Structure formats: C-alpha cells, structure tokens
Image (spheres, helix red, strand yellow):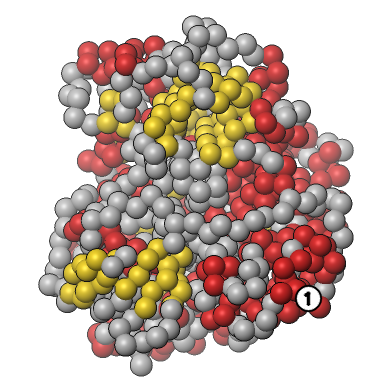
C-alpha cells in the first residue's frame, strides 16, 4: 500500500518550514508538505479533515506584510510560503457547573471578564480559518446575547488562532463553548417528544416487543425486515 | 471559472441535462437478494485475496484483512523480560484508554457511578477529543418520534448488519438511544430543532423512519466538544500524547492497568488500575486494500492489538466499512468524508453519462458496491461509467446542486456548512457543480467481543466504541456509531466502576505478553513487525497518492 505511483511529474515549489527551505510538489496541503519534507508529526496534526483544529498554522508570503492564519490540513502550499504549525494554545479555561449557571451575559462576563477588554480591532475575525465573524461574537457576548454568540460560533474548531492574536487576550473558544452549552441547555426549546419517549421506555412500553425481537431466528427477522414500512422522503 | 478540467466539465453537462428528469424521482430500492448479489460481486470485502486466517490467539483461524493480521501477529514494542513494573506512576480505580467519544463518556459515567475523579485517568494518543468521534458529520440515530420505536430501530440496525449483529447489543443500542439524546440536551448539545423544540430528523442509508438527529453537519464535533467540556468541568484527569503500548495483568488473570508511552519525552509510565476500559477507536489509518480513509491520524487499531494479547476474542473483523462518498477530486481532499446527509437531503449519485444507477440511501456497503460497479471497466465485470481524474482517481458524481433545488436556496450552506466550506476552499461551489466521490475506508464494523455491559470476558477489561464488535454486525448504519460510543461508553463506564469497587489488584505482570510471544514463535512468525503501530508514517513520497488499486 505504501508504494508510490506518480503519474505526472509534479511541479515543485519551495516552502520554508520554520525557516528551513524544502522543495515539495505544488498542490499539497501544508500538512502533507511537512510529511513530504520528512517530518513525522505528533503535535500539529489530528483529524486531517478540517474538524479538530489541531493544525493551526501561521505563515507569510514573500513581498506581503500580512501574517496569515489557517489550518495546515485545509490549505494548499504556495511558492515561497514561510510557515510554522502551532503545537499548542495556552489559554485558561474556567470550570463551571452547567446545572447551576444562568444563560446570561453576566455568566459569560463573570467567568471571562477579559471580554470587556475587546478593542474591536477585528484581528480575531481576520485570523479565523473558518471565516467566522469572531469579533461580532465578542460584541454579542458583551451585549449579553448568548443565542447570537452560540449561532455565530457554532462552526468554531477551537484551533486557538484568534486567541493567539487577540490584543485583548480573550480566550475566545472557551467563551464560545460556554455560550453554546448555555444556549443548548437553557435557551433552545425542549424536545417534548424526546422526553415522552424516554418516559415510555422507563415505563417498559417497548420491553415486550424487544424481548420478542431478541429471541427471533434470522429467518423471522428477515421477514419482519422486509415488511418494514418506509417513511416517505 | 471551474477548477474541473474540460473533459470533466463535459460530463457535468450531461449530469445537468438529466437533472430535471431526475428531480422528484428515485431509483427503486433493491431487494435483499439483489443487495447480496451486488455485494458478492463488487464489495472489496468479498475479494478473498484481501484477507488471511489468524495464526495465533483467541480468534485463531478467523479471516481478517492482511493489514490487520500483520499487526495482530506482530511482536510487542516493550520487551516483557526487561520492563520494570515496580515503579507505579499512576494508581487509579478506572483507567480509560482513549480520549475520543467512547472514552470521555465512559470516564464521565464511571464518575457518575461513584468513582472520584482523582481515581479516574484518561490516557490518549493525541489531544483529548482528537478522534473519529469529532469528525462525524451526519448525525445520530434514536427513535424519539411518535411514529418510530426502538423496535423499528432494532430491525433497521440488524437488517443493515445482514443479521450478523449480536441482538443483545442492538437492543441495548436502541433502548438507550432516546435517553442519550436527552442527556445531551441537558448537557447543552445544540441539536437541530424546529421552533417548538421538535428535533429535526431525516433519513440515513438503511433507515425506515427519519430518525437521524443532527447538529448541522458538525454533529460529531458538537457532541464531542460538549462531552469534553463536561469532563473538564468535572475535573477528570487526562494524559495527552500518552498512547497505551501494552496492557498489564496480575497473577489472578485480571487486567490491571497499562504501560503508556509519552510520545514527546519518549518515556514509559506504569498505570495500575482496578478496571481498564479500551476506547481506542478503529483502524482507518491501516489503509486496508490501499483505500484512502476518512479517519483521524491516530486510527491505527492499537486497542485490537492490546486486547488480543490478553486473550480477548475478536469478531466481524473480516468486514470493513467503506463509506460510499469519499471525496475523489481535487487531490488535496481525496478520501475525506462527504456525509451521507448530502444524499439524505436529496443529492443523487449519477454516472459519467448523468444516469442515476442506484437508490441514494441503500445501506453503506450496498451503496459502495454500486459505485464500484459503475467505475470498474467492463473487462473487470464493471460498467466503465466512472469519471477518471487527472491524478488517476476515479469516481461518480454526487449531484449536490439538487439539495438547494429541493429544499430551497441556502439550505446546502446552512445544513452542510463544513462540506460547503471545504469545497469552496478548493474552488468548487457544490451548490452549482456536482462533486466527484468514490468509496473511502471509514469504519471498523467488528472488534473486541463484549457483552451488553461492555465487558470483554477478561476480568477487569471493558471496551466501548469503534474498538468493540457485535453492535453493527458486518455493516453499520449511518448514525449508529455516535450512538454506539455513547451507549456503550456509558455502560462500560458504569460496569467498570462497579467492578473497581470490589476488585483487588495483585502483582503487575507482562506474563500474558511473554505467552503471546511464545505462541508467535511456535507458529513460526518471524520477528519482523512490531505493534501497536501508534501513528502511521507518511513521510517522503508516501505523502503522494499511494497506489489505490481500485480498478
């Protein structure tokens, strides 16, 4: 499985991984470029598919003053790019008891008073690989609009890039996690049918039927399976 | 400007031409006999050359993929004769190996069952939460609606598994399911709901009722991060970058902890535990039969290796789940998951000529087999109607623009934001152009044998999540893996807590490893391979597309 079959000779580009130059094929992601260059990654790698936020990366391009921030597994290398994958984001998380907190802006501010230090510079938004409106979420938190914070930050991967760049030193992704749980536990409407079903199960409504199903032969199960009524799409 | 080369755009035009006729229609579902015929001829599991019988251990003689046999028949990383077990670094009641969904749920419920948090330890290979659990997109099944029931969920799961599942485990799965969703709601998981609180549920492949609950297409991420946050609130200790490399046993034949390896300082640590829960996940990164995978970096089947050496039985490892829709283009994202929810929302699979050739929501193995049949050339019994990419991948079209045409503009971006974002990054707008897909290695259907409490039959050893087998038989349905890790993580956590309250641990030993090595030698297996694998190696040219021997 490990042999290589390169059908077309790839065009090569130069990337500077923590200052060292490596020639890698164009079209690779930054993550794969590191591996191609010989790195066996332990930090800075996780799901490899844009979900876990382990591969937060900062880079610059030649002749461009900006510091870019993105995920190594979701970004294609560019010629002359110089980059570093961040191994870790130091950011303090404040514990709380979800059963005891109130779903209000005061809760957010009590646990994360540094929210109030926001200077509205928008650096967080510019550094978000998910292109979220991060600063709008900070402002919503300051207004006490927990539902808005939850909505704006739902796609956050906790990669930590905004937190590393924030001049107000806000640990954004911990605040967002708190806000989303407050929303889910208190502000979102409850699913009545779910609660009814759990009660029915506790009362043993389905016990007999399940007892019977677990004792059937394969042939009997096949017949029941074939006879299922399929809910229209 | 499209990033698809001209010849692919030519095929896309055919897809667009047939689209108006396909809207509102669907390919008929196959009968059980037709399904079985399709699987036999086209599913990779049915290639006999892909597997071999195990030559050692409790499941001697059972067929498993070569890549798995290579690890199960490998020699240990630690030398049992030369390892000092006298210095115990961590002494706990419950050790949880694996910090994904199953492990986190198990630790939380071990605590709820009365184990103080400082007597629990999670050890994990990467960071807490880095796992396949966090990558799940589509949803979680539970019969929560009035017209549905746990019994119907039971039938769907057991039929999807070709009636090979352990009925006791399926029962536990479906009977606990609504409770799990309710627990999540209380913890603050943001499930997709109507304005009155009704859960929005859709079909998944092989479901007869719409019971797929989701959190946009970040369902796995949302559930995992809430569980992790709760474990942090409770103060459950976690050792990150510390994979287990061997279980420990004592003179009573119980599992009594593990040796863990600090990947950064490269030191061993000894963990003594009264109960041990394996929650190590699956095997995607073994790239069985050369397939690309949707799995996270650490999915290297370590738990199977550890469990096998203490004498645990394995089951259904001859069946590999290939998710029908892995990305096949562009090269940067080959193998990554395109959630079944895309088909659940109406996108149809069509061939190079724009023809619909299978119902979009057959069980995953059947759906995959149909895509493979479409792509194989006629001389290999296929139809030769796939689209070959410039780098030699092949695939069929998933007609994604249909989602917004059916459900209204903006639906795709809202309900499938992770997929939308991924394609936009690489220059394809899936609401305007179809995307190319091909089956990708997704899930370990089988695993360590357990009972309905997650007990492996080995005293002191429990298992939960993808590492265990029997829940899904030889084919898992979409939405039953997130459910599995919650149901069996909880059950294993509770059972391990009860065990730990009574257990007494004797002298720590690696005697079981010595015995296993003797068995390997007697079977004449050369000492060329070591396991667990811990991490795959993609350095150098292995980075580029490996030979994917698909055609």
Comparing A122 with B420, the one in front is: A122
The chain letter under disc 1 is A
Side of B434 relative to B393 (left or right): right
In which quadrant of the rendered view does residue B542 lie? bottom left
Among the 4 quarters of the image, the one containing residue B159 = top right
Q: Residue at x 58, y 22 (%)?
A: B91
Residue at the image position 36 percent from the left and 36 percent from the top: B266
Q: Which residue is mark 1?
A: A142
The residue carrying pointer 1 sits among few (fewer than 14), some (14 to 19) or many (20 or more) residues within 10 Å by Cα, namely some
**In the depicted structure, whether residue B65 falls above or below residue A49:** above
* One can see residue B475 in this view: no
Residue B94: x percent and y percent?
62, 27
Please state which of residues B426 and A28 is positioned toward the viewer in this rendering. A28
- Where residue A136 sits in the image (x, y, percent)? 68, 81
Please give left or right for residue B95 compared with residue B425 in the image: right
Expressed as whole percent of the image width and height from the top left, the position of residue A179 reads 74, 65
Residue nearer the viewer, A217 or B351 = B351
As drawn, which residue projects farthest toward the bottom?
B1
Identified at 55% across, 64% down, the residue is A160
When the figure is inspected, residue B20 is found, relative to residue A48, above or below; the finding is below
- The spot of residue A60 in percent (x, y) is 37, 78
Locate the C terminus of chain A by quadrant. Answer: bottom right
Asked whether B332 or A1 is in front, the reply is B332
Q: Is residue B126 left or right of residue A225?
A: left
Residue drawn at (56%, 57%) of the image: A90
Please say if A97 is above or below B87.
below
């Amino acid at each position: 499985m490990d042999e290589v079959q390169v059908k077309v000779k790839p065009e090569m580009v130069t990337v500077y991984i923590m200052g060292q130059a490596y020639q890698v094929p164009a079209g690779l992601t930054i993550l794969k470029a590191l591996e191609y260059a010989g790195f066996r990654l332990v930090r800075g790698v996780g799901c490899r598919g844009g979900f876990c936020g382990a591969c937060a990366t900062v880079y610059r391009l030649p002749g461009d003053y900006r510091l870019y921030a993105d995920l190594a597994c979701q970004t294609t290398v560019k010629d002359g790019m110089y980059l570093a994958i961040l191994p870790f984001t130091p950011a303090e998380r404040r514990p709380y008891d979800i059963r005891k907190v109130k779903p209000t802006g005061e809760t957010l501010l009590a646990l994360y008073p540094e929210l109030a230090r926001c200077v509205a510079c928008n650096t967080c938004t510019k550094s978000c690989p998910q292109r979220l409106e991060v600063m709008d979420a900070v402002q919503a938190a300051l207004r006490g609009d927990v539902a808005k914070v939850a909505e704006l930050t739902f796609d956050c991967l906790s990669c930590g890039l905004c937190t590393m760049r924030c001049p107000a030193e806000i640990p954004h992704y911990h605040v967002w996690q708190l806000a989303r749980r407050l929303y889910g536990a208190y502000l979102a409407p409850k699913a009545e049918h779910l609660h009814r079903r759990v009660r029915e199960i506790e009362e043993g409504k389905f016990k007999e039927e399940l007892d019977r199903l677990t004792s059937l032969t394969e042939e009997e199960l096949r017949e029941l399976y074939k006879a299922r009524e399929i809910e229209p799409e | 400007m499209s990033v698809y080369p001209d010849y692919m755009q030519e095929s896309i035009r055919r897809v667009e031409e047939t689209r108006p006729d396909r809207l509102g229609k669907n390919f008929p579902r196959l009968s059980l006999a037709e399904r079985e015929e399709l699987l036999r001829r086209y599913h990779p599991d049915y290639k006999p050359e892909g597997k071999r019988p195990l030559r050692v251990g409790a499941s001697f003689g059972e067929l498993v993929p070569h890549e798995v046999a290579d690890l199960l028949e490998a020699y240990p990383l630690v030398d049992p004769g030369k390892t000092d077990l006298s210095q115990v670094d961590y002494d706990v009641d419950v050790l949880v190996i694996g910090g994904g969904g199953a492990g986190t749920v198990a630790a939380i419920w071990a605590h709820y069952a009365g184990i103080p948090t400082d007597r629990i330890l999670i050890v994990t290979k990467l960071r807490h939460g880095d796992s396949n659990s966090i990558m799940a997109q589509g949803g979680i099944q539970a019969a929560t609606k009035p017209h549905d029931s746990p019994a119907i969920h039971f039938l769907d799961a057991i039929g999807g598994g070709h009636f090979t599942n352990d009925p006791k485990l399926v029962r536990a799965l479906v009977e606990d399911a609504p409770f799990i969703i309710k627990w999540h709601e209380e913890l603050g998981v943001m499930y997709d709901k109507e304005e009155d609180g009704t859960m929005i549920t859709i079909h998944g492949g092989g479901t007869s009722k719409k019971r797929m609950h989701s959190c946009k297409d970040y369902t796995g991420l949302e559930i995992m991060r809430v569980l992790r946050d709760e474990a942090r609130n409770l103060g459950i200790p976690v050792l990150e970058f510390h994979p287990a490399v061997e279980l420990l046993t004592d003179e009573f034949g119980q599992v009594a902890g593990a040796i863990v390896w600090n990947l950064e300082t490269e030191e061993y640590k000894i963990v003594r535990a009264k109960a041990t829960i394996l929650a190590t996940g699956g095997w995607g990164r073994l790239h069985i039969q050369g397939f690309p995978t949707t799995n996270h970096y650490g999915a290297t089947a370590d738990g199977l290796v550890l469990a096998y050496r203490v004498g645990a039985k394995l089951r259904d490892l001859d069946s590999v789940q290939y998710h029908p829709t892995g990305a096949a283009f562009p090269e940067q994202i080959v193998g990554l998951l395109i959630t079944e929810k895309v088909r659940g929302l109406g996108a149809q699979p069509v061939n190079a000529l724009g023809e619909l050739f299978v119902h979009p929501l057959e069980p995953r193995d059947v759906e995959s087999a149909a895509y493979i049949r479409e792509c194989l050339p006629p001389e290999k019994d296929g139809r030769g109607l796939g689209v070959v990419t410039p780098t030699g991948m092949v695939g069929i079209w998933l007609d994604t623009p249909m989602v917004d045409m059916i459900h209204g503009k903006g639906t795709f971006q809202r309900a499938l934001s992770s997929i939308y974002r991924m394609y936009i990054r690489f220059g394809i707008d899936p609401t305007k152009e179809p995307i190319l897909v091909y089956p990708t290695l997704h899930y370990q259907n089988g695993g360590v044998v357990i009972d309905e409490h997650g007990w492996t039959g080995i005293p002191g050893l429990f298992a939960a999540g993808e590492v265990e087998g029997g829940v899904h038989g030889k084919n898992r349905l979409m939405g039953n893996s997130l459910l599995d890790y919650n149901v069996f993580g909880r059950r294993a956590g509770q059972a391990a807590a009860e065990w730990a309250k009574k257990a007494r641990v004797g002298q720590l030993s690696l005697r079981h490893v010595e015995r296993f090595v003797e068995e390997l030698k007697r079977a004449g297996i050369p000492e060329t391979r070591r396991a667990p694998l811990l991490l795959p190696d993609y350095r150098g040219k292995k980075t580029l597309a490996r030979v994917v021997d698909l055609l």
